[in-house]
Image (cartoon, grey):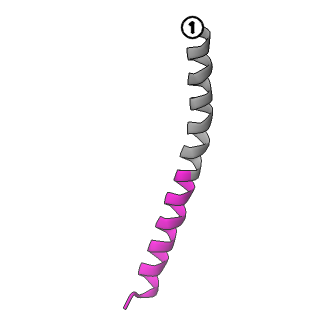
Amino acid sequence: DLDDQTLIKVGFWVAESSHRLELISRHIVPLNKYRKSDTQKNT
């Protein structure tokens, strides 16, 4: 059985990792748009 401390740690880890994933996905979308506009300018 998991004790409260372990559950709290797991909860924090899940929240942190999901928050990081959200930030990463937010940064990836503008980067992809920027790269596409860059390649269009070069052609």
Considering every residue shown, the one lying at the far top of the view is 43
Q: Which residue was labeled with disc 1? A: 43
Q: Which quarter of the figure has residue 3?
A: bottom left
- Judge whether 12 appears above or below 17 on screen: below
| Residue that extends furthest to the bottom in the rendered view of this protein | 1
In the depicted view, which residue is nearer to us: 14 or 5? 14
Q: Position of residue 25 (x, y in %)?
A: 57, 45
Image coordinates of residue 18 in percent, x first then y, are 54, 59
Residue 20, horizontal then vertical, whole percent: 53, 52
The stretch in magenta equals 1-21
Residue drawn at (61%, 43%), measured in percent from left and top?
26
Q: Which of 10/21 is in front?
A: 21
Q: For the residue labelled by badge 1, is the local secondary structure a helix, a strand or a loop?
A: loop
- Front in this rendered view, residue 38 or 12: 38
Q: Is residue 5 above or below residue 18?
A: below
Quarter placement of the C terminus: top right
